[in-house]
Image (cartoon, grey):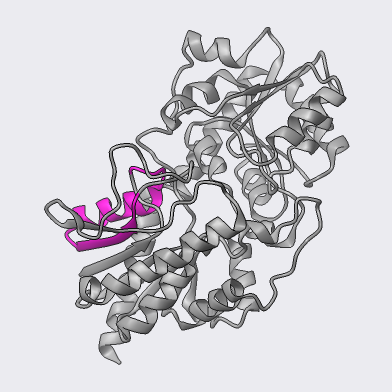
Amino acid sequence: MRVGILSYHFPPEPAFIPGSLAEELAARGHEVRVLTGFPDYPGGHVYPGWRQRWRHLTRSERLTVRRVPRYAGGDGSTGARMASHLSFAGSVAMVGRRYLADVDVLYVFQLPATTFATAALLRMLGRVPTVLHVQDLWPEEEVAADGAQRQRGPGRLATTMRRVLREADALAVTAPSMRDLVLADGVDPDRVRVVLNWTDERIFQPVRPSRAAQGIVRRDGRCVVMHAGTIGVRQGLETAVRAAAALDGRMDLVLVGSGAEERRVRGLAAELRAENVRFVERRSPVDMPELYAAADYQLVMLRDLPELRGTMPGKLQAALACAAPVIASAGGDTAELVERARAGLSCPPEDWATLADRFWLASTIPAAARSEMGRRGREAYLREMSLRAGVDRVEDLLNQVAMARRGG
């Protein structure tokens, strides 16, 4: 098939799902054309050595990537994000019709940031069958920092999101509970399939920790629980800090990364005098498997919000692929998968006392039993969430909608 791919982010950005999908589809003999922006994530500034321009095209044997300009504000504000979303949609509208006109099927890596561009392409390409791989139904600004839930209202982004979900020929959703959410928005159940995300398997695999990684993560023989990734509103890491503070002297909590809530979380750790809570600056993804191996457990945190119960954060796939035992403070599909795979421990979200109990229990589990948790988690990843399994499902869905449209 001739497959068009629309993605807001694409390598060299850390966008391994659309990137690896494009490479794998091309390797399977499909002609793949990607339409994306210039790399600016996570800092919000175009990468050094790149210059935004209209005619930027790269080609390999079966893969072509066309990049279009978009606003790169860099300040992370809601206004800057919206300007970037709208400018990307405008650029896509200018080049999308000609670039993707003769594709057999369109795949969209569907983030809130892509919504307006998706709507533009659906309008312009008309009868080209479309599969949306839905990653997130809720823009970050719709989760309040003070803990209050903001319902999706009649705003332009939410309205457009609902429309494109209904207009697409098929939806791939990243968790079973997300399927329930899109069905509640009126999408035909026959058009929705669960396709779990995979991770970058060239990076995330079991390794032995280096001495340098041990020096970063460990201080002594105590149990180490590590959280790697964004310190943001959705993670609710204050809960983890309170839980760890209750066990000072028995375990360490190591937070690797940064984010909008980092100052708040650091402030709480200082207020509680939690000397067993340590912060490590953001590291390159290639460094993370050794840091995972140096810790005893990986912590996966999600707030107690209905929309997050249908979310599986990427750090879960990365941890499982690395055979790292997991402690999940989350509801819905994340906790269910950890328990079903017997890959670690779980507890309800935003309950610091129960999480402290899980931290204490984790510290008592022998190393051999932790290794078995990690082994079972990796087996579950390979069986349900691997690159091969995910691309097989996406390719099958692309074939189905292309054939159905031709048959119609």
Residue 244 visible: no
- Quadrant showing the C terminus: bottom left
Residue 33 belongs to the span the image colors magenta: yes
Q: Across the whole image, how many numbered discs are drawn on residues?
A: 0
The location of residue 269, given as percent across then percent down, is: 80, 26
Residue farthest along the left direction in this orientation: 61
Residue 227 belongs to the span the image colors magenta: no
- Quadrant showing the N terminus: bottom left
The location of residue 105, given as percent across then percent down, is: 29, 74
Residue under the image location 33 percent in, 50 percent down: 19
The answer to whether residue 167 is left or right of residue 263 is left
The answer to whether residue 149 is left or right of residue 83 is right
Picture layout, residue 239 above or below residue 215: below
The answer to whether residue 5 is left or right of residue 333 is left
Residue 20 visible: yes
Image quarter of residue 406: bottom left
Instruction: Name the residue nearer the viewer: 195 or 377.
Output: 195
Residue under the image location 34 percent in, 51 percent down: 38
Picture layout, residue 393 above or below residue 230: below
Q: Which residues are magenta?
A: 12-38
Image quarter of residue 253: top right
The location of residue 214, given as percent across then percent down, is: 55, 12
Instruction: Name the residue nearer the viewer: 103 or 170.
Output: 103
Residue under the image location 63 percent in, 39 percent down: 342
